[in-house]
Amino acid sequence: TVRRFLEVHGETLEKVVFAVSELEEATYQKLLPLYFPRSLEEEVRSLPYLPADIGNAEGEPVVPERQIRITEKPGIPDDASDEEGLEADLSFIGSHAFARMEGDVDKQRRLILQGQLSEAALQKQHQR
């Protein structure tokens, strides 16, 4: 991350200081030449040891599962056309697990702990 940041903003900084513990120091001493080679020879030697994916332009890891994906019209399938208007099949609305969630889960949990939830509600909670 530091190397990628310096590639973009390095001219604005005079010095980078790594504050590490004694336990971490040996690791940094071994890995710093890989990411900050002091010569062309050291750079060539370090290439096989560097990971193939070094993140985005800022050096941050890119995890596809954590990326925010925003659709233009959430809840409407991609194949639905705008021309269908009100006749569109809306049966899929409310089918998502979050939409089926009933009541306030925290309130139900509190009532269970206080022993104030009905037997039917307790059975439903147990089924969930």
Image (tube, rainbow, N blue to C red):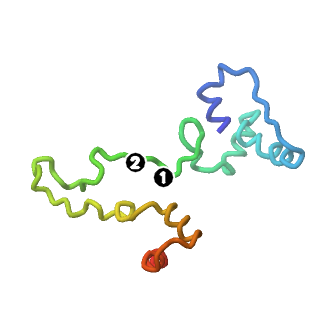
Q: Amino acid at mark 1?
A: Pro
Quadrant hosting residue 15:
top right
Q: Which residue is mark 2?
A: 69
Quarter of the image with the C terminus in it: bottom left
Provide the secondary structure element on which disc 2 rests. loop
Residue pointed to by mark 1: 64
> Where is residue 91 drawn, in percent x and y?
21, 63
User: Which of the two discs, 2 and 1, labels the residue nearer the N terminus?
Assistant: 1
Q: Please rate how many residues cluster around mark 1, counting C-alpha atoms within 10 Å: few if below 14, some from 14 to 19, many from 20.
A: few
Decide if residue 95 is on the left or right side of residue 66. left
Label 1, secondary structure: give it.
helix
Figure quadrant of the N terminus: top right
What is the three-letter code of the residue carrying label 2? Arg
Residue depicted at x 83% and y 47%? 24
Q: Residues within 10 Å of mark 2 (few under 14, many from 20)?
A: few
Question: Given the current orientation, which residue lies at the most extreme front position?
Answer: 116
Q: Total number of numbered labels? A: 2
Kindly identify the residue that appears in the image at 15 percent across and 47 percent down: 82
